[in-house]
Image: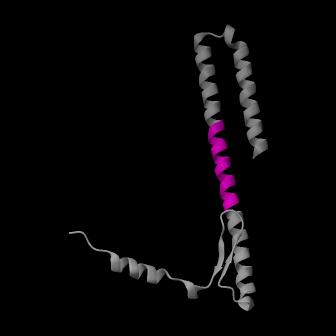
Amino acid sequence: MSTELGGLKKNYMGRIQQLQAKAPTMSQQEGEAAQAEINQMQMTLQQREAQLTQNLQEKQFKKMKEINDKIAEFLKSYNSSKKFAYIISRSPGDFVYFADSTYNITDDVIKGLNATYKPQQ
């Protein structure tokens, strides 16, 4: 992706230099056409850069999901004999890779919040 973007930018900059060199001898119509060409090239470059960036982000997300799924799968098996209640990552973003559902308090929290909720009239 870097190579492709580098090539596009090099072509873009090269074309700008060519047109700038010819600028003093261009008619107004040729100058406007050159400016339109530069604008089109810039827009194409920006669109391609955005597309490549999005593709890279999607690939990174997919790879991270695959890695996390493999870790979670391994830890589920690993924990079958260890009986840990939680297995937590120590890396940035701290994932909970395993949580024993026995300790899930979601229903209690919802019931407690609902009990304290007073409808407005």
Residue drawn at 71 percent across, 68 percent down: 90
- Span shown in magenta: 45-61
The vertical placement of 6 against 77, above or below, is above
Task: Report which quarter residue 74 is drawn in.
Answer: bottom right
Residue drawn at 62 percent across, 15 percent down: 30
Residue drawn at 72 percent across, 25 percent down: 15
- For the residue pair 33 and 108, the one nearer the viewer reads as 108
Residue 69 in the image: x percent, y percent? 69, 74
**Number of numbered discs overlaid on the protein picture:** 0
Extreme-top residue of the structure: 25
Q: Is residue 40 magenta?
A: no
Extreme-right residue of the structure: 3
The vertical placement of 112 against 80, above or below, is above
- Quadrant containing the C terminus is bottom left
Q: Taking 83 as reference, is 106 left or right?
A: left
Extreme-left residue of the structure: 121
Residue drawn at 63 percent across, 26 percent down: 37
The vertical placement of 86 against 17, above or below, is below
Residue 61 in the image: x percent, y percent? 67, 61
- For the residue pair 45 and 91, the one nearer the viewer reads as 91
Task: Report which quarter residue 28 is drawn in.
Answer: top right
Q: Main secondary structure of the magenta part?
A: helix
- For the residue pair 77 and 35, the one nearer the viewer reads as 77
Task: Report which quarter residue 111 is drawn in.
Answer: bottom left
